[in-house]
Structure formats: C-alpha cells, structure tokens
Image: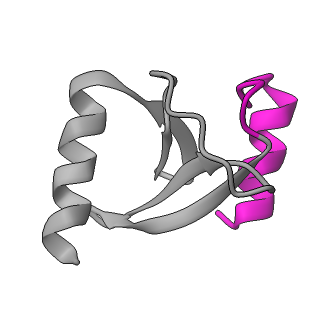
Amino acid sequence: MTKEEVLSWLRENNRLPGYFDDIEFVGIADKNDVYAFTTKSGVVHDIGLPRLIVIEDNRPKIVSGLEFSKIIGKLSKKN
C-alpha cells in the first residue's frame, strides 16, 4: 500500500491518533512495509501511543507493546 492509501484507511477507520497527522515509511520487516506515525511539523509526541503500522496481506495493522518491540528489532537488524 502507498502512504496515501494507508493514510486514507486510517482516516476512514478513525485510527489516526489525534496527536499525529502524518505517517512515514520506516522500512520492511518480514516482507511487510512498516510506517510510523509522525506529524507534518516534525514534532514527535512520544507519549506511549501506538507508533507503527505494519502492512500485512495488503491490510494495515497498528502495532504496540511486545509486537512493537519485535518489529523495531527486525527493522534495527536491517539497518
């Protein structure tokens, strides 16, 4: 999915957290595209909200907690 498609899905499903207004591509984990919530102004609100969206089988999935940590680990190993 493109960034625009993911943003559209987030808005249509009311899944774009109020503190964030944009997303950015951060890499690939297990052959799945991974996006991170961000802001157009560049200010990142690190207040414990879910921060990653994983595209699995062409469907967005917001991840947090232990799953978030696993994805971050996989992204870190590739960089």
Q: Quadrant of the C terminus?
A: bottom left
Relative horizontal placement of residue 26, taking residue 24 as reference (left or right): left
Comparing 36 with 47, the one in front is: 47
In the figure, residue 66 lies in which quadrant? top left
- Residue 53's spot in the image, x, y percent? 51, 44
Residue shown at 84%/34% (left/top)? Answer: 11
- Residue 3's spot in the image, x, y percent? 71, 63
Residue shown at 67%/54% (left/top)? Answer: 23
Is residue 68 found inside the magenta-colored segment of the image?
Answer: no
- Residue 1's spot in the image, x, y percent? 64, 63
Way the structure is coloured: one colour
Rendered position, 1 above or below 6: below
Farthest bottom residue in view: 79
Is residue 15 found inside the magenta-colored segment of the image?
Answer: yes
Relative horizontal placement of residue 68, taking residue 27 as reference (left or right): left
In the figure, residue 76 lies in which quadrant? bottom left
Relative horizontal placement of residue 76, taking residue 43 as reference (left or right): left
Query: From which residue to which does the magenta span run?
Result: 1-20
- Residue 65's spot in the image, x, y percent? 29, 23
Comparing 41 with 60, the one in front is: 41
Comparing 8 with 24, the one in front is: 24
